[in-house]
Amino acid sequence: MPFKKTAPDLILIITTFALLVVGLIMVYSASAVWADYKFSDTFFFAKRQLLFAGLGIISMFVIMNIDYWIFKRWSKPMLIACFVLLVAVLIPGIGMERNGSRSWIGVGAFSIQPSEFMKLAMIAFLAKFLSERQRYITTIKKGLLPSLSLVFLAFGMIMLQPDLGTGTVMVGTCIVMIFIAGARIAHFAVLGLFGLAGFAALVISAPYRIKRITSFLDPWQDPLNSGFQIIQSLYAIGPGGLFGLGLGASRQKFFYLPEPQTDFIFAILTEELGFIGGSFVLLLFAILLWRGIRIALGAPDLFGSFLAIGIISMIAIQVMINIGVVTGLMPVTGITLPFLSYGGSSLTLMLMAVGILLNISRYSKI
């Protein structure tokens, strides 16, 4: 290798494990009642989350020791494979439907969500593209348009499931990468207008999305339907106060807040651990963001910098959207909280992404 390898970023490892531990505790606390009712096993979701965490940690340490340049060589095959999976998930008999979205492919007793892995594949491919063609990024024809074409093709396929939340995270991440690469603000302004028009069309085309927007503005207009989750989430956060009701003492997990171990786990966390507990988790994410930016700045080449920026942007955007939804600052989108929410594909992907960051950190010049 052209660069000397050093020890990985220890602070990033410690922060990741701290988030994982908090996540495992909260998945059990939030899901125990529901798991006991549905599966007669209070540890049902916690055990599966622990299994996914174990697989993810193994993947993280393996990837940490594989030079990140391999993702440059394999970025195109990875992207093609993810496109194939996005097509497969739409085929009846292959794709599994949950809560109105056909986003999963069954693998034995478990399932994978191809759109989650598309996010990482797109980041790797875009990092390669931008590192090789950065001088063209200020032009529309040779830089901006080619880089965004694949992004919006993937977004369109994800929307066929439909999964607006995951698609939004992927597009937002790629836009951050392209902006960091040096794209012109004027070009972004024009594209932003088209993007707003397209987003408005997506919202108008689906009545349930319109309800989510209106319920976000005033959830009490429809408290038993579109506004139900936001209201119950706020009912969880409010009583938490400064120190919370105590670990395991949540009231909203008793069938008020639907499946609290997934998208709304932060609401249960703040109900039980209060403002202090919620602030501690946000501090951990801030440290993760800091270390990720530091790794990106110290990467020995452009590909490593863009890859690290893409990964940390993906995590940051997902955290902001999830916290925004849970606290009623954004419409409900169905986005998990990285490392904390229950979900095998999301947790495994995030730990794999951290593994890539750790490998880049081993060649950092800072």
Image: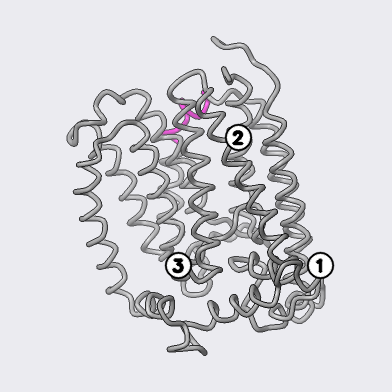
Q: Is residue 260 left or right of residue 71?
A: right
Residue occupying image coordinates x 55% and y 54%: 319
Q: Is residue 158 left or right of residue 24?
A: left
Instruction: Between residue 161 and residue 332, name the one nearer to us.
Output: 332
Q: Which residues are magenta?
A: 69-77
Determine which quarter of the picture holds residue 193: bottom left
Residue occupying image coordinates x 22% and y 62%: 197
Compare marks 1 and 2 and give the one earlier in the sequence: 1
Q: In the rendered structure, which amino acid carries the disc numbered 1?
A: Phe
Compare marks 3 and 1 and give the one earlier in the sequence: 1
Look at mark 1 in the image and give the residue it sits on. Answer: 43
Q: In the rendered structure, which amino acid carries the disc numbered 2?
A: Arg
**Residue 27 horizontal/vertical position (percent):** 73, 64
Look at mark 3 in the image and give the residue it sits on. Answer: 330
Which image quadrant: the C terminus?
Answer: top right
Q: Is residue 14 magenta?
A: no
Residue occupying image coordinates x 55% and y 69%: 327
Q: Main secondary structure of the magenta part?
A: helix
Q: Are marks 3 and 1 in contact (CB under 8 Å)?
A: no
3 vs 1, front mark: 3
Compare marks 3 and 2 and give the one earlier in the sequence: 2
Determine which quarter of the picture holds residue 92: bottom left
How far apart are the alpha carbons under marks 3 and 2?
27 Å
Look at mark 2 in the image and give the residue it sits on. Answer: 291
**Residue 61 horizontal/vertical position (percent):** 70, 33
1 vs 2, front mark: 2
**Residue 108 horizontal/vertical position (percent):** 66, 59
Q: Are marks 1 and 2 in contact (CB under 8 Å)?
A: no
